[in-house]
Every structure is written in C-alpha cells, then in structure tokens.
Amino acid sequence: MAEAVSFSTKSQSNLPATAFRFGSDEPLVSIIVSNYNYGKYLRTCLDALTAQTYRNIEIVGVDAFSTDESRSIFEEYASKDTRIKLVYCPRYEKYPAVTYNMGFLHSKGEFIAIADPDDISLSHRIEQQVRYLLAHPEIDVCGTNCREFNDEQDILVVTTVERNVQNAAPPVRNPSLMLRKDCLARHGLWNWRCEMAADFEWLYRFYCGGAKFHILEECCLMYRHAYGTNVSSTRKLNQTLKLALFRTYFGVRLFHSVGFRWWRMVFITCLYASKLLALYLRAAVVHKAKKWRSLLNRELV
C-alpha cells in the first residue's frame, strides 16, 4: 500500500508520551553509515543524524576507500562533533557486508541503527525507535515506515512486518532498522563474502532464528529511491540470481508459515533472472561475433 502525502519532519508518534522518559542513563545508540562514493549526499545524511532529538548517539562512519570527497566530508564533521568516529578500509572493499560488519564491531551502543549515506533520517527517528524498544523488551529489531523519494517522486510507503514477509520482502527495510546489540551475538553478523542481497539473507536469518520484528507506523526516514542506472548488467544479474536463491531457501525454511504470495515472488524473481541472463548471453555473443569479424577482416586485408 502506498499513498502520496505532503512531507513533514514533525513527529506524529502514536507512542504514549509516558512510555519512557529519557534521563541521564539513556542508552547509547550506535549509528552505522556505510559509504562508498556517496559524497554527493553524505552531508545531508550527517546533518540529519547530528540533529537527532535523541542526543546519546555515536555515528560510526565506515568508508570503503571512496575516490570522491567522502573522506574529507567525514573528517570535517568528525572535527566538529566528537560523537562521530571513522573507520577506513585500506583498499577498495566491494563487499558491503564487510563494511557493515566493521561498523558493528566498532560499535559501543546498546542499540545499533543503520543509516545509508544517501538517505535522510528525520529528526525524531532515533528517539522514537529507542522509546519503542525500551517500552517493548520482547522486540529485537525495530524499523519504520519510509518515504521513497527522488527527483520524480515522493511517496509514503506504509507496510507491516507481516505484509513484508507475505510478499518475500525483508521483514524491515535495512536502512530504517534499529536492533539490540545482543541480537548480533545470537544471530550473527552479515555474511562476510556475500556481495548481493546480503541484507535479505541477514534479516531472514534473524527472522528464522526467532528474532521479533516491528515497524513503527509513522514515517521516520526519507529513502532515496534509485532506478538502478548506476548498476551494471552483470551486477544486476548477479543480484537477481542471489535474491532468487535466498527467497527459495528461506521459503523452504518458512514453508509452513508463508503462502502463495511468497512463492509467486520467487517465480517472478526467477523469471526476471532468466530474462537478464538471456540478455547478458545475447550481448556476450554479439560482442564475441564482432571481435571475430574484426579479426577476420584484418586477416583478409
């Protein structure tokens, strides 16, 4: 379900104001910002995080050897705000799982949140998630509803954990989540060498392991929606194949609790992967034919 509504940064939380009153013993929240060449958006992301109404945070900026101005932006903000600490990869790291795990391992907070460098966390996001987790100790992972936006759209996407699982989507959207740090001890970090759909595998490993998820009704995140223009055809194919594999694997593990819509998504993903594979093979054959034709012309000359 999606509806277009006007954007507002004001909190409209349905949580009771008396659910939790923050004091001097408020828990530390570690916010992971995993970045590679997102300098274009990084200032906006960091401005939003440093302006959070919940102040007891640390921002763990992990950079995968960016070649743009990202590191200088990180250092500029870290010099002004002691809550920001930086973790740099010594060389380009293509596996996002590695940078996320580095962030987790450098986190000191009781709660850990994820913020993608091209997204915008609304000012009350961290406060509302901490408030909910403290009021509901049975919940392990808390996400929020989001607004998907870019130059062409601004849409509020309202969903629930149950709806996401029915449709073979992650239980919560990865860049909106906050989790209890002890969840990592029970269910593990990201799969270190998983380049594609790593967040899907990680979150469903939590879900199958008994972790309890919740999505706040209100919007607390502006999610920048990209159309994949910066993704190569090979990368898109690999990502779709890995997603099809994970959806099939977890569909089997959750066989008694998922239904038709899950397996419909598995079929659609496999069909799309087949289409991409056919296009990839066709392009490879055409490229090879051109190469041989060029070599043949040289010989004839």
Image: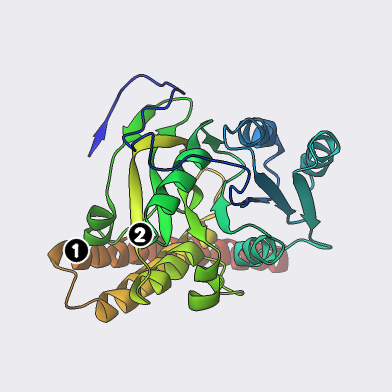
Compared with 257, 128 (above or below) is above
Give the percent coordinates (x, y) of residue 16: 33, 36
- Side of 278 relative to 101 (left or right): left
Q: Is residue 66 visible?
A: no
Image quarter (top left, top right, bottom left or bottom right) of the C terminus: bottom right
- What's under tag 1, amino acid-wise? Arg
Compared with 27, 224 (above or below) is above
Q: Nearer the viewer, mark 1 or mark 2?
A: 2
Which residue appears at 38% of the width and 42% of the height?
A: 19
- Side of 251 relative to 284 (left or right): left
Q: Which residue is mark 1?
A: 264
Image quarter (top left, top right, bottom left or bottom right) of the N terminus: top left
Give the percent coordinates (x, y) of residue 112: 57, 56
Which residue appears at 55% of the width and 38% of the height?
A: 119
Task: Specify the color scheme.
Answer: rainbow
Question: In which quarter of the view is residue 289 placed?
Answer: bottom right
Q: Does dot 1 land on a helix, a strand or a loop?
A: helix
